[in-house]
Amino acid sequence: MTNAADTRPRTNLLNLTRSELEAFVVDELKQPRFRSDQLWHWIWHKGALGFADMTNLSKDLKTKLAERASLDRPQIDVVRQSVDGTIKLLLRLADGERIETVLIPMGPHYTQCLSTQVGCAMACAFCSTGELGLTRNMTAGEILGQILVGRTHLAQAGLATVRNLVFMGMGEPLMNLTELLRSLETLGSAEGISIASRRATVSSVGIPAGLKILGDSGLAVPAISLHAPTQELRAKLMPKAARVPLDELLACLDRYPIKPRERVTYEYIMLGGVNDSITHAKQLVKLLGHRRCKVNLIGYNPPPADSGIAAPFRAPQQADVLAFEDYLRSKRITTFLRRSMGQDIAAACGQLKLIAG
């Protein structure tokens, strides 16, 4: 005779926070609380693929878990590796939707670029992901599942593991704030993935209400996609983001609760002949010169030549990039040139568009 409980959908444990997992184990499975600690350790620290691998769980609990729960990770459809060592994974989610995550070699470890949405609604003119439009938000389990898949892939290849995370993949993280915060809460667990807040960076076009909540949480540091030194130019390049006036956005960031040694990071994609002149550098100094910040300059990454996609912009001249950088530094603005990794596999900043063939 079929049990009523057998017809209930199984719970994906990757979607549960620590407290939710405890409640599931105690209230739903009628198991002692310490079993949730064991489960958490197996899922997030050891990266177990199935309940049968969890050697210190009782047979009874394993049976109940097999009936009532799952560990549904994204599945790898395609792997592409760049000449510079960057790895892009095309992942298929449980409903068949696809997203990309990127593993970037950084010395003795990797930084992983995570997606938070299937597609993106922001439609920034220089970003390939924005051309897809927004399909849906990702769940916390899907966001965190990228890390588990990434770490497993690196381990199987005999490579170093992921140490830093940047939420800079597909989507606008603050438009999926609830699931983002649930993900960040899980990241910091000492018995789990154990990546400290200072090693997790959330990139956003700047949504004041979301930034306020993120700042109050203390779970991550922000990187703001600025990309223009004036409201007028930003409105042309980032029309949806620019609905928040620059002065309002900057005032919000001035209030962001950063630690004594931290600074607000501003990302600035340099588009040849559009925002890369000394005049633009002077405008940026006027905007940021009195603020506690740092600027990351990023050369525009056009679609790969073999993609068949026409580039809406051109990359800046190296001389213009260096002159821009020198001017900012001469005005005592901490400035970095961010090296674009994985350009040849469409894995660099602004290139993610499910190009994996």
Image (spheres, helix red, strand yellow):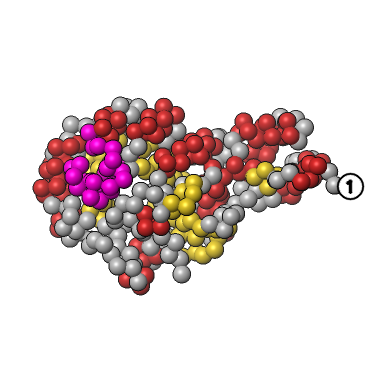
Is residue 354 toward the left or the right of residue 306 in the image?
Answer: right
Spot occupied by residue 245 in the image (x, y as percentages of width and height): 25, 37
**Is residue 242 shown above or below 304?**
above
Is residue 111 toward the left or the right of residue 234 in the image?
Answer: right
For image coordinates 52% across by 53% down, the residue present is 150
**Is residue 337 shown above or below 311?**
above
Spot occupied by residue 125 in the image (x, y as percentages of width and height): 29, 55
Query: Relative to the observer, which residue lies in front, 121 or 321?
Result: 121
* Element assignment for label 1: loop
For image coordinates 64% across by 42% down, the residue present is 13
Task: Please give the residue where the numbered disc 1 appears in the rendered image.
Answer: 1
- Give the extent of the magenta segment: 223-247
Assess whether residue 232 is covered by the magenta stretch: yes
Kindly indicate the quadrant of the structure image that contains residue 59. Answer: top right
Query: Relative to the observer, which residue lies in front, 346 or 97?
Result: 97
- Within 10 Å of the Cα at label 1, are there few (<14), some (14-19), or many (20+) other Cα atoms? few
Callout 1, which amino acid? Met
For image coordinates 70% across by 45% down, the residue present is 10
For image coordinates 64% across by 38% down, the residue present is 40
**Is residue 350 shown above or below 225?**
below
Residue 23 in view of the camera: yes
Spot occupied by residue 14 in the image (x, y as percentages of width and height): 61, 43
Spot occupied by residue 194 in the image (x, y as percentages of width and height): 52, 38
Residue 113 in view of the camera: no
Is residue 67 toward the left or the right of residue 14 in the image?
Answer: right
**Image label count:** 1
